[in-house]
Amino acid sequence: MKIPGSEITMNNAPEVMNLGAKAVSEGDGVFDFEGISHADSSAVAALLRWKRLCEKGHVAFEIRNMPSGLRDLCLLYGVTDILGSDAPGSTRDPA
């Protein structure tokens, strides 16, 4: 799923989370952040929710084009390992 818009903030997080949940229910666990230039901690919450839904539904979870600011938030909150090897900066990240 390509994340719509240019930002994920508290203002649009519920809508974005629901779009992601719908994508997972349809078997799509790829979350592409291309075009997202700003994200706050609600984007981290969305990622964690989508990861849980993917695990529950046995759908492969993948993050693409994560913006550097979101990557920094994931590192700050210590969730890169929870998000898996697809989360840039995780200890399982081959980069």
Image (tube, rainbow, N blue to C red):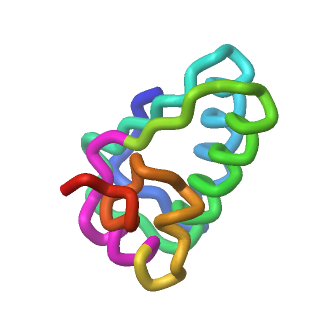
Q: Closest to the observer: 54 or 4? A: 54
Please state the horizontal and vertical placement of residue 4, each as a whole percent of the image.
Answer: 42, 37
- Could you tell me which residue is drawn at 64 percent across and 46 percent down? 51
Q: Quadrant of residue 87?
A: bottom left
Q: Closest to the observer: 19 or 31? A: 31
Residue lying farthest to the left in this orientation: 95
Examine the structure image and report whether residue 76 is included in the region drawn in magenta.
Answer: no
Q: Is residue 93 above or below residue 42?
A: above
Q: Closest to the observer: 89 or 68? A: 89
Q: Quadrant of residue 62?
A: top left
Please state the horizontal and vertical placement of residue 76, each as a whole percent of the image.
Answer: 44, 84
- Could you tell me which residue is drawn at 28 percent across and 58 percent down? 67
Q: Quadrant of the C terminus?
A: bottom left
Q: Quadrant of residue 72?
A: bottom left
Q: Is residue 18 left or right of residue 77?
A: right
Q: Is residue 21 above or below residue 51?
A: above
Residue lying farthest to the bottom in this orientation: 76
Residue lying farthest to the right in this orientation: 56
- Could you tell me which residue is drawn at 77 percent across and 27 percent down? 57
- Could you tell me which residue is drawn at 57 percent across and 53 percent down? 47
Magenta-drawn stretch, dominant element (helix, strand or loop): helix
Question: Over which residues does the magenta segment extend?
Answer: 64-74
Please state the horizontal and vertical placement of residue 30, each as a whole percent of the image.
Answer: 47, 30
Q: Is residue 60 left or right of residue 73?
A: right
